[in-house]
Amino acid sequence: MRKLITTTALAAAAISTTVAVAVPANASDDCTPRSGTDAAPGPWTSDSFTDWSRSETTPADPDLASGEDNLANLIQIGEGWSDTAKDTYRQKVSDGVKRVTPWSTSDTAPSLGADEVVGDRHEERVGNNDAASATEGKPAVPGVPAVAGKPTVWANFSPNKDQGPLIGEPSYPIDPRGTWHVEDKIPGGHTGPDGVYNPSEGDGKGSWFYRSAGTPGTAAVPGTPAVPGTPAKAETFHTEFSWDVYAFHYEYRWSVDKRGITPGTAPVTCGIDEPTPEATIPDTPTTPDTPTTPDTPTTPADQPSETAEAPGSPTPVTQVLAAHTAAPATHVPAAHGQTPHPAAPAAQGLPVQVLAAHPTHQHRAAAAVPTTIDAGL
């Protein structure tokens, strides 16, 4: 019976050793639990522009979706002219020439209507019609001086009282024999040639007279100065201006903004490990390569026999070892405070039964703790 006890003890030692090394190798891996995240819309970015339009009304969103948290709202109409007053969002569009201003010497642009804009300026050179041919000069003409007139004189001669009879014609205008009395008009009946005369026809005894018919004078005639000749003169010119005036209208556009979706993440859940009791490993657990049968010991007369009293036949050590090596290497919890009875080794679970009795966790393995099953020798 000592032989049977010895082989059973070897099987128990082998189980103790094998269970100690069956702890999972990844038991020290870390597991960080974290909550999952929902999908969320990303930031808006400017992507393009709408087409130009005459309307100042902001168009509807292309996706017809609204709400900042709405995952279907991925495209929207952004800023425009009414938001920024930037020329990026408004342009002038010409409707063609509306009118042309008249020609003018002013180079100032014309006044414009509300829907008008000045266009091209035109210039032309206009003659002043001031050309002239050359002329010849004229010499100076001297003037004629004035000619004084001769006054009319009529005079009669009075001899001196102490003068005897006057013999001969008195001299005019002075004669010592008497005095001439001058008048400025010739009386009637005394016409005739100028000079001293006696109407008594020369008998020398009548009165003597003097007459001189007057003549009018002539006014002076002024001369004319010389007239110089003139050279030929070319025509002069001036510039006149005209403008094209265009009609126009405004057109508007808006930015188109787009955004993507940031995907959500799945939650990470770590398993909760069962508490592992402390256990010890035998100092020198050994499993012989080839089990040997020791000599049958001699049982002393005073020692009770340990043979057939145990219920059932004991499990051969080869079966125990074979069952143990076939068991998967999973976590084996230690038995708290239990010591198998040496008389009933078959009551302990085989390694495969022990391993199956311990549940495994999906996320975190238990720490490797060696376990010893005491064979109760």
Image (tube, grey):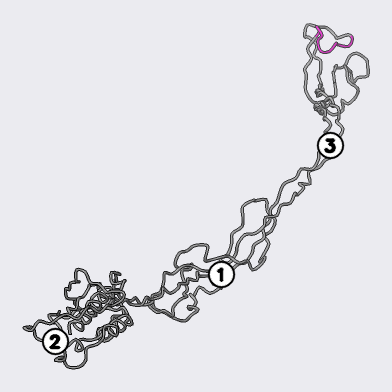
Stretch in magenta: 168-177
Residue 335 sits inside the magenta stretch: no
Mark 3 is on which residue type?
Ala
Please, what is the dominant secondary structure of the magenta stretch? loop
Q: Mark 3 vs mark 2: which is more N-terminal?
A: 3
Label 2 crowd bin: few (<14), some (14–19), many (20+), radius 10 Å: some
Q: Are marks 1 and 2 in contact (CB under 8 Å)?
A: no
Task: Residue under label 3, please give it.
Answer: 232
Q: Is residue 87 left or right of residue 275?
A: right
User: Which residue occupies 17% across, 85% down?
Assistant: 1
Q: Is residue 22 left or right of residue 48?
A: left
Label 1 crowd bin: few (<14), some (14–19), many (20+), radius 10 Å: some
| Screen quadrant of the C terminus | bottom left
Label 3 crowd bin: few (<14), some (14–19), many (20+), radius 10 Å: few
Task: Residue under label 2, please give it.
Answer: 306
Q: Mark 1 vs mark 2: which is more N-terminal?
A: 1
The answer to whether residue 359 is above or below residue 42 is below
* Residue 362, image x, y percentages: 31, 80
Task: Residue under label 1, please give it.
Answer: 251
Mark 1 is on which residue type?
Glu
Tag nearer the camera, 3 or 1: 1
Q: CA distance from mark 3 to mark 2?
A: 165 Å
